[in-house]
Image (cartoon, helix red, strand yellow):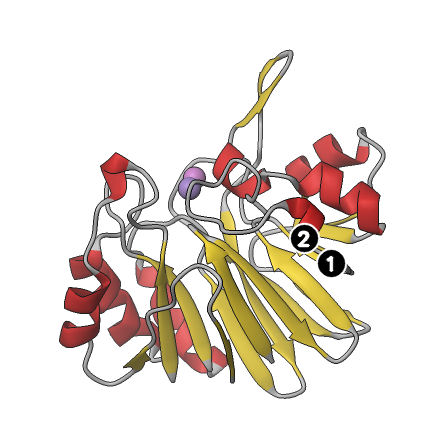
């Protein structure tokens, strides 16, 4: 799987025929070095929860590329009304797609959607465990530390994307505990330093994590795992 960090909590990955974005917050993302027009092909979009820095440019991108949006049922219902293709899932649900297996995981956070007609229910916030060709990627979404993360150990996660910015999500201290619960092979910190309220030092996080390899990516960096 090839994984690229776009910035904040936004990642792009490629595996076989799948070209996907997770939480496609690009054009207004202060950390992103690209715009949506730089994305040439997209087959799937995953959305963890309803907040603007996660739904981002999903509608525009889904329309441009005819990409399938995979998200919780409430967000899927909202986006379907805007004429995009959706696959609704929910927390704890696992399903097989043509490209691999996807499970939605719980997140301890909010999920309301800001619309032109006020705020709309975005269901429960979540994360995704995505398995393609034997490689498993976990995007935690925005979340605090939870005991539920202990259950992720049995998913044999190769790569975990964990928020460390604090204030709205886990800080570095709690993210270190999350790594101990999840026991992934590799970890990439995310959701830090994009805005003033989520300042964190990824090098400190890296120096304190013991049994997993921490990889710090700058926006635009990509890795294969
Ligand atoms: Ni959020
Ligand atoms: Mn967020």
**Residue most extreme to the top:** 117
**32 with respect to 174 (left or right):** right
Position of the N terminus by quadrant: bottom right
**198 with respect to 72 (left or right):** left
- The residue that label 2 is drawn on is 38
Count of number-bearing discs: 2
* Residues packed near mark 1 inside 10 Å, few (<14), some (14 to 19) or many (20 plus): many
Residue 94, above or below 114: below
Residue 94 occupies quadrant: bottom right
- The residue that label 1 is drawn on is 44
| Point 41% across, 71% down: residue | 151
Alpha carbons under labels 2 and 1: distance apart:
16 Å
Q: Position of residue 59 (x, y in %)?
A: 73, 37
Query: Judging from the image, what secondary structure is the residue with disc 2 in?
Result: helix
* Frontmost residue, 114 versus 72: 114
Task: Let me know if residue 135 appears in the view.
Answer: yes
Residue 129 occupies quadrant: bottom right
Mark 2 vs 1, N-terminal side? 2
* Residues packed near mark 2 inside 10 Å, few (<14), some (14 to 19) or many (20 plus): few
């Amino acid at each position: 799987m090839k994984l690229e960090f776009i910035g904040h909590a936004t990642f792009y990955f490629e595996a076989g025929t799948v070209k996907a974005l997770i939480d496609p917050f690009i054009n207004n993302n202060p950390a992103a070095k690209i715009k949506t027009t730089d994305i040439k092909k997209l087959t799937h979009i995953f959305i963890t929860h309803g907040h603007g820095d996660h739904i981002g440019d999903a509608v525009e991108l889904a329309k441009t590329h005819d990409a399938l949006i995979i998200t919780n049922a409430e967000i899927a219902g909202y986006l379907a009304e805007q004429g995009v293709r959706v696959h609704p899932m929910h927390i704890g649900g696992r399903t097989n797609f043509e490209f691999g297996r996807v499970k939605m995981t719980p997140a301890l956070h909010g999920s309301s959607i800001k619309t032109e007609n006020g705020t709309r229910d975005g269901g429960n916030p979540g994360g995704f465990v995505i398995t393609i060709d034997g490689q498993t990627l976990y995007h935690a979404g925005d979340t605090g530390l939870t005991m539920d993360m202990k259950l992720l150990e049995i998913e044999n996660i190769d790569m975990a994307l964990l928020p460390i910015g604090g204030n709205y999500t886990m800080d570095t201290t709690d993210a270190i505990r999350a790594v101990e619960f999840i026991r992934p092979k590799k970890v990439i910190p995310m959701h830090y330093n994009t805005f003033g309220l989520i300042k964190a030092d990824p090098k400190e996080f890296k120096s304190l994590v013991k049994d997993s390899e921490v990889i710090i990516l700058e926006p635009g960096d990509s890795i294969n795992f």
